[in-house]
Image (cartoon, grey):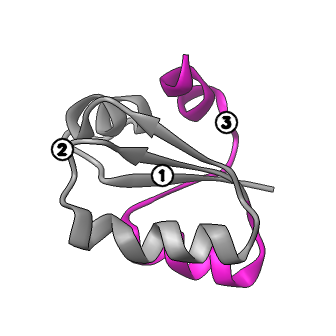
């Protein structure tokens, strides 16, 4: 279900640094985080999303999130943009 949101969205950012940057710019509707990612990597994203009052959806795997984003490798985070 959550993977469908990413694959159907028109504007998606993939990756931790890009997601944090977009959150700080106020451009994000929702963040998707892979639950199998390392805590130290996703912590800054969670913090930025909470500060921006953006909902966070946890998904099962980095591999499946990357596939939903249309990339060949796993993705820790993806952000659906306004």
Which residue in the structure is indicated by mark 3?
Answer: 9
Q: 30 above or below 3?
A: below
**Residue at the farthest top position:** 1
Q: Give the quadrant of residue 36.
A: top left
Q: Give the quadrant of residue 23.
A: bottom right
Residue 39 left/right relative to 28: left
**Residue depth check, mark 2 versus mark 1: number of the one nearer the observer:** 1
What separation in Å lies between label 2 and label 1 (alpha carbons)? 13 Å
- Please give the label number shown on residue 78: 1
Q: Main secondary structure of the magenta part?
A: helix
Quadrant where the C terminus is found in the figure: bottom right
Position in image of residue 17 (x %, y %): 40, 77
- Nearest the eye: 24 or 66: 24
- Please give the label number shown on residue 40: none
Position in image of residue 29 (x %, y %): 75, 53
Give the SS element for disc 2: loop
Label 2–label 3 contact, CB within 8 A: no
Residue 42 left/right relative to 14: left
Circle 2 residues within 10 Å: few <14, some 14–19, many ≥20: few
What separation in Å lies between label 3 and label 1 (alpha carbons)? 11 Å
- Nearest the eye: 9 or 32: 32
38 drawn magenta: no
């Amino acid at each position: 279900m959550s993977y469908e949101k990413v694959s159907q969205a028109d504007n998606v950012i993939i990756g931790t640094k890009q997601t944090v940057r977009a959150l700080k710019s106020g451009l994000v509707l929702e963040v998707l985080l892979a639950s199998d990612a390392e805590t130290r990597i996703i912590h800054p994203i969670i913090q930025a999303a909470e500060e921006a009052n953006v909902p966070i959806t946890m998904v099962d795997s980095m591999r499946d999130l990357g596939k939903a984003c249309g990339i060949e490798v796993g993705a820790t985070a993806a952000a659906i943009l306004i």
